[in-house]
Image (cartoon, rainbow, N blue to C red):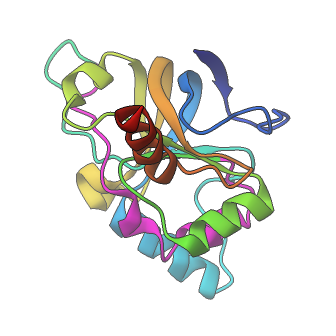
Amino acid sequence: MIELQAPFLDTNLGHLVSGTPVVISGVVYTARDAAHERFAEAIAAGEGLPVDFNGQVLYFVGPTPARPGHVIGSAGPTTASRMDPYSPLLIERGLRGMIGKGRRSQSVKDSMRTHGCVYFGAVEGTAALLARHIVECDVVAYHDLGTEAVHRLRLQRFPAVIVNDLHGGDLYVEGPARWRTAAIS
């Protein structure tokens, strides 16, 4: 288990290997489909983004409203491939980490390797448990999007696994291959 502190401004991510479990603490931002579309529109129009993504981590989540006495409601990962058309735009602007579920496209993986970004998988179906690792939550942009607004989260030992590393490692390819090898032995 590797402990990581976000943001990853001066962090060397080259030692991270796909399949390795991690815990992430520190500040990350949330963004889903609607926010990504607005990011792309702002970039195309030459406008500034509401967050400086240099060194940052994005969690693909639309948290539910918090119950009284809680920081956040359920906060499970959404399917990352829906952000694939937009992710390279943010990676090129310094995004260093993404958290979601599911596979990424080849163009996203190529951009990640070129610009030094890692993709982490969070376990789907554990939204209430993952929310326990979020100790602060504030909306910072696109308030009108409701749960899809951009939130600033402070994580404390948030569990994830490295899916795509900087060396081309891909847990969705390597994991089944390891299982097949073990099953044949």
The quarter in which the N terminus is drawn is top right
Magenta span contains residue 102: no
Residue 55's image quarter? top right
Which sits in the foreground, 156 or 105? 105
Q: Is residue 45 left or right of residue 155?
A: right
Which sits in the foreground, 63 or 158? 158
Q: Position of residue 44 (x, y in %)?
A: 61, 87
| Residue shown at the point (80%, 39%) measured from the top left | 14
Q: Residue furthest front?
A: 185
Q: What's the magenta bit mostly, secondary-structure-wise?
A: loop
| Residue shown at the point (69%, 48%) measured from the top left | 96
Magenta span contains residue 93: yes
Residue 2's image quarter? top right
Q: Is residue 42 left or right of residue 112?
A: left
Q: Is residue 54 left or right of residue 6?
A: right
Q: Taking 93 as reference, is 11 above or below it?
A: above
